[in-house]
Image (cartoon, coloured by chain):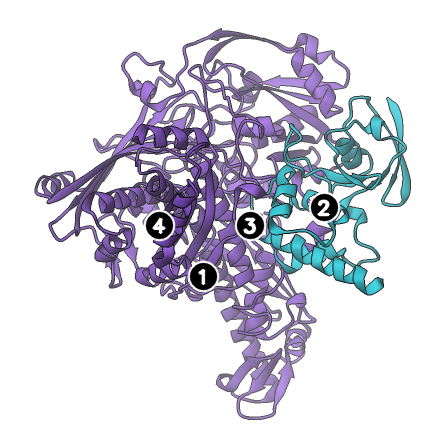
Amino acid sequence: MGVEGIGARVTRKEDKRFLTGKGRYTDDMTVPGMKYAYFIRSPHAHAKIVNIDVSAAKSMPGVIDVLDGKELQADGIGNLICGWMIHSKDGSPMKMGAWRPLAIDTVRYVGDAVAIVVADTSGEARDAAEAVVIDYDVLPAVADVTAAMRAGAPQLHPEAPGNLIFDWQIGDPDAADRAIASAAHVTEIDIVNNRLSPNPMEPRATLGIYDSAEDHYTCYTTSQNPHVARLVMSAFYNVAPENKLRVIAPDVGGGFGSKIYIYPEEIVCLWASKKTNVPVKWTSDRTEAFLTDAHGRDHISKVRMAFDADHRITALKVDTIANLGAYMSLFSSAVPTYLYATLLSGQYAIPTIHANVRTVYTNTVPVDAYRGAGRPEATYLLERTIETAARELGLSPAELRRKNFIRSFPYQTPVIMNYDAGNYEASLDAAMQAADWNGFSARRANSEARGKKRGIGMSCYIEACGIAPSAAVGSLGAGVGLWESAEVRVNAVGTIEVLTGSHSHGQGHETTFAQLVAGRLGVPIESINIVHGDTDKVQMGMGTYGSRSGAVGMSAIVKALDKVEAKAKKIAAHLMEASEEDIVIENGELKVAGTDKAVPWFQVALASYTAHNLPSGMEPGLKETAFYDPSNFTFPAGCYIAEVEVDPETGETDIIQFVAADDFGNIINPLIVEGQVHGGLAQGIGQALLEAVHYDENGQLLTASFMDYAMPRADDLPSFKLSHQNTPCPSNPLGIKGCGEAGAIGSPPALINAITDAIGNNRLTMPATSMKVWQAIHAAH
Amino acid sequence: MTKVTLTVNGRTMSGECEDRTLLVHFIREKLGLTGTHVGCDTTQCGACVIHMDGRSVKSCSILAVQASGSTITTIEGLASQGELHPVQAAFKEHHGLQCGFCTPGMVMTAVDMINRHGGSLTEEKVRTELDGNICRCTGYHNIVKAILAADAEMASGRQAAE
């Protein structure tokens, strides 16, 4: 640890450009001859396309061309795919319906892309789109997942009878049934996890540039994983071979999962650039973002948790239905299965778990990973259930949790995961102390005296991050490996570039990754640059999601640094005529341990490039590459406590305090980790109190703007109280677990547990709006 | 097409635009100042906040032709001679930004807030005043902290000058 090394509270290197308007996002990019695209989208949730007439639009001012799906298909551009194969419990593969980048015969959700206009200005493109005449034969639509499963429901894809994509299970159903039948107590609860729109503040955008002389494509895009975008666009969508396709994700204004996927627009703009021979830029407006960015969550579940007479959990049985929308998005199948049901053991020793998950098509935008992805759904279900059980059993919520905590590691759950380290009680104790849990009853009495209802609730979450061991996820159906790559490039003057396959879209990698190198070599942080987000610069990478960039991305840098240091030591030993084993690297120098002999770092770098005096047979240069494939998931965990005061007259909830006690393993930069928790908490509190996507029964999206979809604002939230109880992760060299999603995973049940505690009615669904809370108060009396 | 002339960050700048062009698009596309961002289409998010004749304005809520003749400060014009404005410095010091997309609007709003309430800001007041700016990354915790710190710093600067 040093001033700028691991553990230091370093302010961010990247901040100055963002603070002075010098950030460079995709929509900021302009190239000579660039034109603007506008996508014509279906206004219907379900319809046959009878005819598309573009003749009037083509003669509108400024219009370069109007292109449709038949032309796209004729040029051999492929359909979008889901990259994670799930098999139903009968052994049949998931039922993937065709998703064309531009619909040809059928549209399946409001916003489904049908055609593209390319024009001189964005205004002209939009005007011309109005002149495109599309005849639709409107079909019955279904937006609600329960309705979609009923007999006679509108059918979305011929491949998927009954709209069922797969019917999957994990665990032993019979053992769970037996344990429930012989239980001393069974808690039963229905759980709804509300559908959300991710809403990074930067809307999606893409700039497709085709170079006819080189037969080469460049794609600027708002992506969390540009290499995966290139791979998929090349291997599956047939846009171009990988060596003829450069994907650049420059500054990206937040992702939260929604920018993992390859959407139709990148593909279509690249293709349209070749068709029209001009660079084509498209920028989503916010309404389009609500209509077309992959949504998150949207589960309904039935839960039974069984206890013995000593209040130990003996079994958990879960039946979940997950809405995947109109098409299977890139990782949509993994979210309600291996990212969800494998976390249903939570922090508890549960001998038997069975989960059944059915996924269903509806006439809504595709659903995929959103911050937490499956783990918030598991945590909300589990933590509401155990809280309910504590109330039923007359136990304090902390006591019931303590009774069931896993206390020795490694711990093998019945649902695949092998927890490597943790100390759940430490976080529970810290959170209760920070929240002054013992003083709550006095505070509640004070609220009652003022006519208010006060409640307190907790949530003990666990998540699996550092996704993931490639062989393990491959055996579970993943189409890709989930390692990460790094290249450490030492320049001749000793400055350093680190090229990483991780992608920063707010996480601060330019600082934390540089801290790792600065700490190892003792060189100034200013001498280190982090390069990411460009397939022409970085060899290959899997990108950033699932809180993986610290645990996996930085581990790859560690491996590359190990190689660089080993070579540098050989050179230094040669220069100082010392033994390689005696060389240590400290404060920017390579020293012979126990002597005053030293050469500065830059001199070793220079020697490697002049190559005038290297050890015999050594190659010139100082640059090393590494790929790191994790040996296990990592398991961040913690305890969150919310205390609320509810006004019974209005149903309004005031968050009095929110406490987060987290175990993230070793921390690189506390400033940045705290920021990640704050942001996650805001999204989780948003889910619990404010946010919900609503479609009407015809599949029209009712929440398609910030005036209809309640984003958390500054005056909706309190300041947060954070602490860390870290147990280093034994599964990676830096002991990192990851911190990006915890806040969003752990917070919703803490809040709902607090509100239901305050109002004395457990029947409450998210978002707990004032109206719902008011109704729940009055239903209780 | 109409000619629009503005004084932007101390320089007179002109450009032709359609009558329907919003000020934010004029600033971004005609003047090439891309620090001002567009995060929504309903004047809710505040990513486009600039200063027009000394007051904060959502530049998506006004036509470029309406703004003609006015004096504009964008995020690019806030720092002077490479020195960050105290609000910019406080955002960096307190990690008041992550992805950076809402940041220009947040900073311009914060400067205006301090101009109007300088020295008397409280956490509650800052949170209320930030109602027109949405951030999805920070949970506002460190933005509020940064604005309060900048307010205190600027107030002590004013006292020292008096």
- Mark-to-mark CA distance, 1 and 4: 15 Å
Q: Residue A300 in the image: state x and y as whole percent.
A: 32, 31
Q: Which mark is residue A503?
A: 3
- Mark-to-mark CA distance, 2 and 4: 36 Å
Residue bearing the label numbered 4: A458
**Three-letter residue code for mark 1:** Ser
Residue bearing the label numbered 2: B113
Q: Earlier in the sequence, mark 3 or mark 4?
A: 4
Q: Colour of chain A?
A: purple
Q: Residue A243 in the image: state x and y as whole percent.
A: 58, 43
Q: Residue A277 in the image: state x and y as whole percent.
A: 70, 27
**Three-letter residue code for mark 3:** His
**Residue at image x 53%, y 92%?**
A594
Helix, strand, or loop for circle 1?
strand
Helix, strand, or loop for circle 4?
strand
Q: Residues within 10 Å of mark 1 (few under 14, many from 20)?
A: some
Helix, strand, or loop for circle 2?
helix
In-image side of A371 versus B57 (left or right): left
Q: Which mark is residue A723?
A: 1
In-image side of A92 versus B98 (left or right): left
For disc 2, the chain is: B
The reply to whether label 1 and label 2 mark residues of one chain is: no
For disc 1, the chain is: A
